[in-house]
Amino acid sequence: MAATGSAELRDVYEGQYRAGDADAARYGRWRTLCAEGKADHVATLAAALENRPRSLVEVGCGDGSLLEALASRGFADSLHGFDISERAVQIARRRGVAQRVERFDGTSLPAVADAYDLGVLSHVLEHVRDPAPLMRETARTCRALIVEVPLEDNRSASRPAAQQGREAIGHLHRFSRADVHRLASDAGLQVIGELADPLPLRVHRFWAIGPAARVLASGKAVARRALFTVAPRTAERAFTVHYAALLTARS
Ligand SMILES: C[S@@+](CC[C@H](N)C(=O)[O-])C[C@H]1O[C@@H](n2cnc3c(N)ncnc32)[C@H](O)[C@@H]1O
């Protein structure tokens, strides 16, 4: 990605949420589909908490698709979202599922310490040049934090074509599981639960156009799932899986 400054980065995200694009509806369906898996991950990890989270904040909530998927599961009584993109915030607000959705400067959240039972940083840290301060700031506002990122420090994601794809969608980092653990530790947090997901068939097939591409995508999805089932850590080093961790303050 050519953008280097904060304002340029914000413009990149504004562009991604542009309404009226020929592809906008398709991207919307893509986000809705992905949000289902992300909401499953949040629900699975949060089940380990002593008390059911009643308030949740999603930082980098984008168009609110994850907030909506969580709302449809009846997850938490109060949902708040913050993002740096005004367009994203407007779309998220229009969903009418969150009590508060606001733009913020990407640095300081307008919330007191421990304002929320649970914070979520879903597919945001890989977009942020210096992810540690955002993780610390989000952790300040909540008693537990779920972070989800794609683990892209793997062989498949090292290919030049994959590198181009990542740049096009604004990924500034290729995280490994150890990177996330280190970020958490540096923020004074401990990992109390974690999961990885090689993603379901419908996600792998979503962008495949035409029968040949769909067969290829299906084969890839089945092969990845098979390797992941027998040797999850080998799979993690071979291709990208989504990784989510539940973090709390280090005791
Ligand atoms: C890939 S989207 C993820 C949206 C949503 N969390 C999800 O999982 O569907 C990344 C989002 O991070 C936002 N973002 C980028 N930098 C940010 C920052 N410093 N603070 C908060 N959000 C940021 C972008 O505007 C974008 O909406």
Image (cartoon, helix red, strand yellow):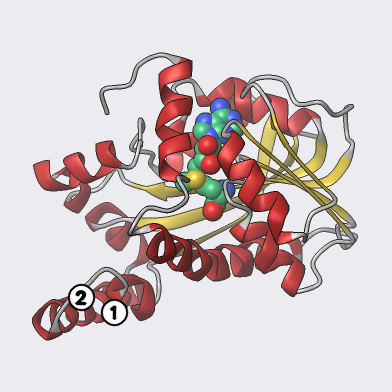
Residue 95 in the figure: left or right of residue 242: right
Query: Which element carries disc 2, helix, strand or loop?
Result: helix
| Residue bearing the label numbered 2 | 217
The residue nearer to you, when weighing 77 against 224, is 77
Tell me if I can see residue 148 in this picture.
no
- How far across and how far down the image is residue 228, in percent? 33, 71
Disc 1/disc 2 C-alpha distance (Å): 14 Å
Query: Which element carries disc 1, helix, strand or loop?
Result: helix
Residue 37 in the figure: left or right of residue 160: right
Q: Which image quarter holds the N terminus?
A: top left
| Residue bearing the label numbered 1 | 226
For badge 1, the amino acid type reads Ala
Q: Quadrant of residue 129?
A: top left
For image coordinates 27% across by 68% down, the residue present is 207
| 97 shown above or below 173 | below
For image coordinates 13% across by 85% down, the residue present is 211
For image coordinates 41% across by 14% down, the residue present is 5
For image coordinates 25% across by 57% down, the residue present is 239
For badge 2, the amino acid type reads Ala
| 249 shown above or below 30 | above
Image quadrant of ligand 1 equals top right
